[in-house]
Image: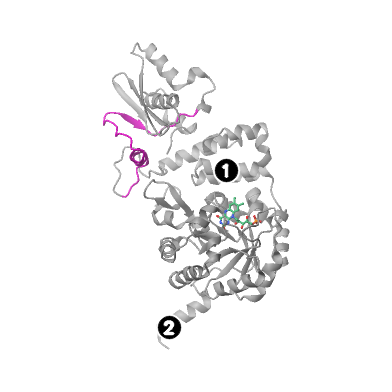
Amino acid sequence: MNFKFFLRLIKKMTLGENGSTLDYRNKVIMAPMVRVGTLPMRLLALEFGADIVYTEELIDMKLMRSKRRVNAALGTVDFVDRSDGTIVFRTCAKERNQLILQLGTADAERALSVGKLVEKDIAGLDINMGCPKEFSIKGGMGVALLGQPDKAEHILTTLCKNLSIPVTCKIRILPDLNETIKLVQRFASTGIAAIAIHARTRDERPQHAPHPDFIREIAKAVNIPVIANGGSKDFHKYKDLLSFRDLCGATSVMVGRAAQLNVSIFRTEGMLPMDEIIVRYLKLSVDYDNPAHNTKYCVQNILKELQESPRGKQFLQCQTLQQMCEIWSLGDYCYRKQLEQKKLGNFGRREVAPGVIPDDDTVDEPEMKRQKMNAPPLDADIIQHNIAFLRSNYSNDTQLPKTRLYTYAGRKNLAIPQYETQGIDKLFRAICTFNGKRYTSSFWEKNKKQAEQGAALVCLLEISEVTENELIKNGSILR
Ligand SMILES: Cc1cc2nc3c(=O)[nH]c(=O)nc-3n(C[C@H](O)[C@H](O)[C@H](O)COP(=O)(O)O)c2cc1C
């Protein structure tokens, strides 16, 4: 036996088929959930005791367009869309050994190129073969792959052969048990490290009872770990997860909705109250500069009907992390963290300090957006900042940026500011001319009035009538 072959054999024996150190047996897992399974929620699930966490489903084409970047200020690895600068996937070392990236794909080559791009940063790759949404099915992804077993098998085989991390798939059951068993056996023979089974068919919805009996029979028929999923409706405490796993005769269990509502379901010691979950979740959102709209969505899922309470209604008005944090007395925490991150060089999606000429690789988001909208370029003399006008910051009309600038002009005996507005595709940008200079915001507002307020805010910042800290604190500066 030659030495290389011997080493490979040892590696396989000790680390498994794919050179993995991840063992899928006896695990409690947070399910892939679109918009829910982003970095702060995954980290919180791990803090509470989940053994493995899945990302939300990420589409192969999007990831292929992205570039891997180390974000030293946040301690994260970001996969940044080259075309618009959005962060497609953010991860960090803390979750590296317990993180499964779930991929939406219909093509083995595309899946492999994504696998190669991300394999250093994750513990395993999962292929979504269970999503019944029209978007997935039309693209030949998700549950559509169960109707094309040759293609599904080819994707799994290609990944298992060529990646250094374990590969899995997540499926739904077919209406017929024997057909499901045959399909799972076929997939198991590709070299996958485990299979997650949502115990419902493609046409069944959360209100339909799952079929643990199917999983039980499948688990008996294959040698790979089976992860039972679909029982969340009856999960009210940690023990319920294990009861569902045992009912299914599975080796591990995966939790979706129950974790979406209260992620402390993973705590063996018992669940924590809602406010504590929100505080811990918001802190992680701030620590990892999570997009405000994503944080808002996740907190809404936790609040549920409490969105109708006075505090819930106040929350629904929020547009920034700072505003959300204020409601749970985390305003100072958010303010200090964001300043710290900025000092360390986290300029969000732009990744370069304003004013620095970006290198070829660097995404200049406002400029990208302008080009995408076919908006005319700005004259070089126009002073520009990426500032949004947030109406909720101004309960008193005299404090509105345009009013403040108007008052300032009167005080200094200067001509009143003039505004010129451009509109494209129902979005607006205003240029404010004041005291011989012109100002604008690179943030396109939803109406003319807001665009003028935004431009006035840029002017007030430049003439030092508002401070940068004030704008960071009220969430107007978009980083
Ligand atoms: C908000 C939400 C988003 C979801 N997104 C995904 C996804 O991206 N990929 C996937 O395979 N399943 C997705 N699912 C399905 C869950 O992973 C899981 O299979 C389903 O909710 C049943 O498990 P449960 O009873 O524990 O909720 C999603 C479910 C929810 C509630």
Taking the image as shown, residue 192 lies to the left or right of residue 451, namely right
Q: Which mark is residue 206?
A: none
**Overall secondary structure of the magenta stretch?**
loop
Taking the image as shown, residue 305 lies to the left or right of residue 127, namely right
Could you tell me which quadrant the N terminus lies in?
A: bottom left
Could you tell me which quadrant the C terminus lies in?
A: top left
Q: Residue at x 55, y 65 (%)?
A: 146
- Which dot, 2 or 1, sits closer to the camera? 1
Q: Position of residue 228 (x, y in %)?
A: 65, 64
* Image quadrant assignment for residue 385: top left
| Observer able to see residue 71 | no
Q: Position of residue 435 (x, y in %)?
A: 31, 18
Q: Residue at x 41, y 44 (%)?
A: 349
Taking the image as shown, residue 432 lies to the left or right of residue 93, namely left
Depicted 189 relative to depicted 170: above or below: below
Callout 2, which amino acid?
A: Phe
**Residue picked out by circle 1:** 297
Label 2 to label 1, Cα distance in Å? Answer: 51 Å
